[in-house]
Image: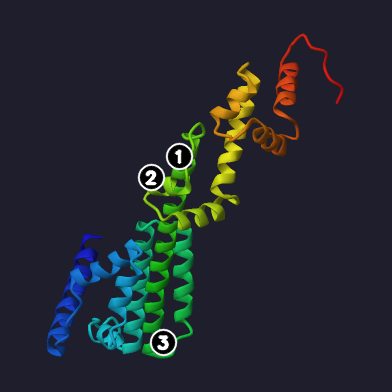
Amino acid sequence: MKTTNNAKIKFYSDRLQAYLLDYSDDGLQRHTMAEEEAIFKQIENGDISALEDRLNTADINIEIYNRVGKMADKPIKSIEYMTCISIALASRAAVRGGVDLDTAYTLTDVFLRSLEKCHTIDEILNIQIDAFYIFTEQVNQTKLRRSNYAYIENAKAYIENHLNRKFTLTELAADLGLNPSYLSRRFTKEEGIGIQEYARKKRIEAAKNMLRFSDVPIRRISSYLCFPSQSYFGDIFKKYTGMTPQAYRNWQHTENDPFSTPREL
């Protein structure tokens, strides 16, 4: 086994020396490690603008083609191998950027299968560029979704902490460092209701607990939860629960009284 391994090592060592000689004679110049890392870092960061600046170079295909080693005797096959490697590296960069593994692997399969239909070097290089763009866009969308989730949750936490204090959309947005209109649109899209409606629902939930577990007068509950009047509070409460605050309190106290006569359903 050791003899076999030594023979293989010598075989590939000889092939390497021969390749380096050809490589030197042809004067090929490879991409530097820094150049490779830069483009895959842009994919990892989801930096579409930076990627576009790099790939919008007029002679980008020529540049890529002229700086690839000889991975096969036929130039088109060499470019195909290079593109396969680039797509695989781009998918790994996307995963590091937050794209889930299954999505990254599936996209890789799609791009590699697309190579089967290519008949020219330009077609192959266009697949590579498409892959770079798509993987970068996937990272960008992933980061955007996470960012949206984070500030929506922060907005909800702010509301929860201000149920007994009046606040405006402007104040909430300023606390989160966002534009009020943008926050309002995104909140409504994510939650299905507007910020003020969400706050009202949370205040009614708080009111239900206060009515159920305390004897605090309804007028004080209304004032504490920032409703402009007790009558308005009653109207909103009935809208969400189907009964008045007093009726809800009476019902809850009866429901939780172990000595009360069970109601017929």
- 259 or 31, nearer to the observer: 259
Whether residue 99 is visible here, answered yes or no, is no
- 20 or 220, nearer to the observer: 220
Query: Which residue is depicted at the point 62% across and 24% down?
Result: 219
Residue 229, image x, y percentages: 62, 33
Label 3 and label 2: CA atoms lie apart by 50 Å
Residue 225, image x, y percentages: 55, 31
Query: Which residue is depicted at the point 41% across and 67% down?
Result: 137
Label 2 and label 1: CA atoms lie apart by 9 Å
- The residue carrying pointer 3 sits among few (fewer than 14), some (14 to 19) or many (20 or more) residues within 10 Å by Cα, namely some
Residue 87, image x, y percentages: 37, 71
In the picture shown, does residue 227 fall above or below 131? Answer: above
Q: Which one is closest to the eye, mark 3 or mark 1?
A: 1
Residue hosting label 2: 175
Query: Which residue is depicted at the point 50% across and 55% down?
Result: 186
Residue hosting label 3: 123
Q: Amino acid at mark 3?
A: Glu
Residue hosting label 1: 158
Residue 221, image x, y percentages: 59, 25
Query: Which residue is depicted at the point 48% across and 34% down?
Result: 165
Quarter of the image with the C terminus in it:
top right
The numbered mark, 3 or 2, whose residue comes first in the sequence reads 3
Quarter of the image with the N terminus in it:
bottom left
Q: Quadrant of residue 218?
A: top right
In the picture shown, does residue 178 fall above or below 133? Answer: above
In the picture shown, does residue 258 fall above or below 63? Answer: above
Q: Which mark is residue 106?
A: none
Q: Secondary structure at mark 1?
A: helix
Q: Amino acid at mark 2?
A: Asp
Left or right: where 171 falls relative to 191: left
- 70 or 174, nearer to the observer: 174
Q: Secondary structure at mark 2?
A: helix
